[in-house]
Image (tube, grey):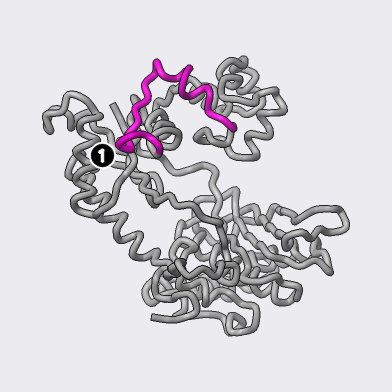
Amino acid sequence: MRFSTVHFRFYVPCTPVTRKNEVPDHPNLIIVSPRMKLYMKKNQEINNLYKRFVSDEDHSVFSVDESFLDVTASLTYFKCDTAYKLAKIIQRVIYNHMGLYVTIGIGENPLLAKLALDNEAKNAPGFVAEWRYEDVPKKVWPISPLTEFCGIGNRMAARLKKLGIRSIYDLAHIEPYMLEERFGIMGLQLYAHSWGIDRSFLGQKAGRPTEKSFGNSQVLPKDYANKEQIKLVLKELSDQVASRLRMASCQTTCVSLFVGYSKGQTDKYGQTGWRRQMKVEPSNNTKVLTEHVLRLFEENYAPGVDVRNLGVSYGRLVWNKNLQLDLFSVPEEQIHETDMYFLIDKIRQKFGFKALIHASSLMEGATAISRASLVGGHAGGTVGLGTTK
């Protein structure tokens, strides 16, 4: 018997804005600086409270504000005959210590617990919902749209609709071998999930992934019309992602670049942006990978169209850090360059990213320095809305 928690959110009527200059002028509006570091600190405190109720093997952090707990072995110890009773105890402990309400989904596996959390608990009395296998027809199948179902994004939803699948009910009643033929093992997993079946368990140790990618993307602070400034940001992104490759002891064989245009703008093909990729020799060398990224950009750049979104991704990874020597380069220089990049990584890990930056990051249009203070893409708390504290 497993249930997932925590998913604490605060709901108020509002108009979403993403820029300071878009904030409406209202006398009752209170503007506070984002404090991601404090948010992460409180998240850790909450997860430490969870560990009072389950062992480390039965506790899994799912995201920055969600965790899974397997309480099977804890019910007897805490003298609870149901997971619901233990959930209410945990909920009360979190509130007493943190002053926060948490929403809780209970299920017979992580999937059902997650679905209960996302689709019912947030609006349920007491912020607790419980979904069992017998609830699948009346609770899982009506979930709409498809993207509200765990594991189905916009792209997958579009592909499913081409097969005539427009609801979770449709997904549960299609021939599973058709899904396997079209989507492989992922298709069979989606079919199982549509019936509430999830055979994963929290104590299961994941092996090294055979296919993964590392990437960084950002929404630029303004529309970028200057080609050289766009290339400057791409160099910074390439540097950051290459560093992540080296930290993971892997190399990429596929470089991907995403460019999104400013709102309302399109190129001569009517596109609002583009994504391109290219196969490369295995590498985690910043200089080499940056050259590949800039080549993709030069080949696909649309003059006269402002850019607002950029993303760099390295995929099809090779899980080793052996240096592939270039026949047309001096081996000693290649080795020296590789050692230099690892040294830069160590300095940044110890003293922070801004301890060692490229001079180009001081130029107009660069964003690496301003982004260095962010935590997970959010303000960490040291920089406010226009002020430093």
Whether 356 is drawn above or below 166: the answer is below
| Residue underneath mark 1 | 57
Residue lying at the far front of the rendered structure: 27
**Quick check: can you spot residue 211?**
yes
Q: Who's the residue at 59% across and 63% down the image?
A: 218
Determine the image quadrant of residue 258: bottom right
**Quick check: can you spot residue 379?**
no
Badge 1 density bin: few <14, some 14–19, many ≥20, Cα 10 Å: some
Image quadrant occupied by the N terminus: top left
Q: Who's the residue at 48% across and 75% down the image?
A: 385
Q: Nearer the viewer, residue 343 or 34?
A: 34
Whether 2 is drawn above or below 221: the answer is above
Q: Position of residue 213 (x, y in %)?
A: 56, 51
Q: Position of residue 176 (x, y in %)?
A: 59, 17
Q: Which residues are magenta?
A: 123-145
What amino acid does circle 1 point to? Glu
Whether 75 is drawn above or below 55: the answer is above
Q: Who's the residue at 72% across and 60% down the image?
A: 263
Q: Secondary structure at mark 1?
A: helix
* In the image, residue 1 lies in the stretch drawn in magenta: no
Q: Who's the residue at 65% across and 19% down the image?
A: 178
Q: Nearer the viewer, residue 385 or 68?
A: 385
Q: Position of residue 161 (x, y in %)?
A: 69, 28
Image quadrant occupied by the C terminus: bottom left
Q: Nearer the viewer, residue 248 or 188?
A: 188
Determine the image quadrant of residue 53: top left
Q: Nearer the viewer, residue 326 or 172?
A: 172
